[in-house]
Image: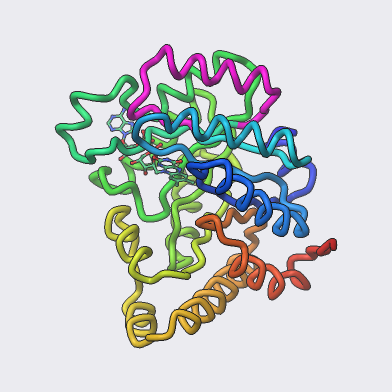
């Protein structure tokens, strides 16, 4: 089912993001975790696609496996930073053949991130171009990335919003946010979108902190603010178990605040783990009306 229809019909959505494993054994293990998370009846799951050799293929294979082995709605990510136009067209055709109905269209970041690498390597410069290509198939519901604090390459938030609007103009149906840790960034982005006439559903991207150093690295790369009290709290934790527990508490509080402020669509960056997300959703289930199946 198309994600825009799920959101329209149900007024909410719950989704999980996974990274395609390198090996069949890894795929099998991840499928077990996905099946455990399936007890929360997610609206869809998504599979990332990163820069580097064979990455389109890896995503394609794992999407096929989820499609074949589960009843889940699966959304592949497609990035245009590395692959050429022919390769992109063939992967879109492949998903069309599989009857995949949703694609997350991204520019992506080339392997050697930096402006020079971009100038030399990009076949499509912006996600908007990929959205246009996918929309031409007249088949897919198209998601795009949105940035509560602005994309790090955008010189200001107004320009960032204008570029989001271009993606919608080319055919994007919904957005998923980059991680954020201060909810006011999400609320302010929604105000900007409203003022600019952007009315697609925007799913909140939630990053449970299970490895603080990794989140710090991603936050720095993505221009995401880590509040000083949050840094102080995680820096004093030495036991990895305490870090995971603090991450569960933090994400639970964040989601509760978003829910109280009317947000109904949540996308969890799982990093291929199910334990923390399971605990967060167990905490949220009574408020969110999630009926966990066995
Ligand atoms: P774009 O929308 O093209 O924007 C990139 C930058 O260019 C922005 O600063 C924008 O303001 C600017 N821009 C856009 N149009 C123009 C224009 N016409 N003129 C000048 N500037 C312009 N990365 C991966 O590699 N693989 C993944 O699977 C992946 N999944 C993601 C999932 C989510 C939910 C999110 C939020 C991000 C994901 N990313 C992924 C990261 C993403 O690819 C990077 O943030 C990337 O740097 C930008 O991608 P984009 O699609 O937002 O690009």
Residue occupying the point 61% across, 51% down: 30
Residue occupying the point 28% across, 24% down: 122
Residue 18 highlighted magenta (yes or no):
no
Q: How is the image coloured?
A: rainbow
Q: Residue 9 vs residue 121: left or right?
A: right
Q: Residue 25 vs residue 37: left or right?
A: left
Using the image as rendered, state which of residue 270 and residue 20 is in the foreground: 20
Quarter holding ligand 1: top left
Using the image as rendered, state which of residue 209 and residue 58 is in the foreground: 58
Q: Position of residue 213 (x, y in %)?
A: 33, 69
| Quadrant including the N terminus | top right
Residue occupying the point 41% across, 49% down: 147
Region of the chain picked out in magenta, as a range: 78-102
| Quadrant including the C terminus | bottom right
Please, is residue 262 above or below residue 139 in the view?
below
| Image quadrant in which you'd find residue 93 | top right
Q: Residue 146 vs residue 100: left or right?
A: left
Residue occupying the point 23% across, 40% down: 113
Q: Position of residue 73 (x, y in %)?
A: 71, 39
Residue 97 highlighted magenta (yes or no):
yes
Which residue is at the far left? Answer: 116
């Amino acid at each position: 089912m198309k994600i825009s229809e799920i959101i329209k019909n149900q007024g909410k959505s719950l989704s999980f993001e996974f990274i395609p494993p390198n090996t069949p054994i890894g795929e099998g293990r991840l499928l077990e975790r996905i099946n455990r998370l399936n007890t929360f009846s997610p609206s869809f799951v998504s599979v990332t696609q990163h820069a580097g050799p064979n990455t389109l293929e890896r995503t394609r294979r794992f999407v096929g496996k989820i499609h074949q082995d589960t009843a889940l709605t699966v959304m592949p990510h497609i990035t245009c930073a590395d692959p050429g136009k022919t390769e992109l067209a063939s992967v879109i055709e492949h998903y069309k053949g599989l009857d995949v109905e949703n694609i997350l269209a991204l520019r992506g970041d080339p392997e050697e991130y930096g402006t020079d690498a971009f100038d030399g390597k990009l076949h499509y410069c912006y996600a908007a171009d990929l959205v246009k290509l996918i929309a031409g198939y007249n088949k897919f519901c198209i998601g795009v990335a949105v940035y509560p604090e602005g994309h790090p390459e955008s010189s200001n938030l107004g320009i960032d919003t204008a570029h989001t609007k271009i993606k919608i103009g080319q055919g994007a149906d919904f957005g998923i946010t980059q991680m954020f840790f201060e909810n006011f960034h999400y609320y302010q982005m929604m105000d900007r979108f409203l003022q600019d006439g952007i009315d697609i559903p925007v799913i909140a991207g939630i990053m449970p902190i299970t490895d603080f150093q990794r989140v710090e690295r991603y936050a720095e790369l993505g221009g995401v603010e880590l509040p000083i009290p949050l840094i102080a709290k995680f820096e004093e934790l030495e036991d990895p178990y305490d870090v995971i527990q603090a991450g569960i508490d933090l994400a639970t509080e964040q989601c509760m605040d978003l829910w109280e402020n009317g947000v109904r669509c949540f996308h969890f960056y799982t990093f291929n783990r199910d334990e923390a997300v399971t605990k967060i959703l167990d905490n949220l289930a009574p408020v969110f009306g999630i009926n966990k199946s066995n």
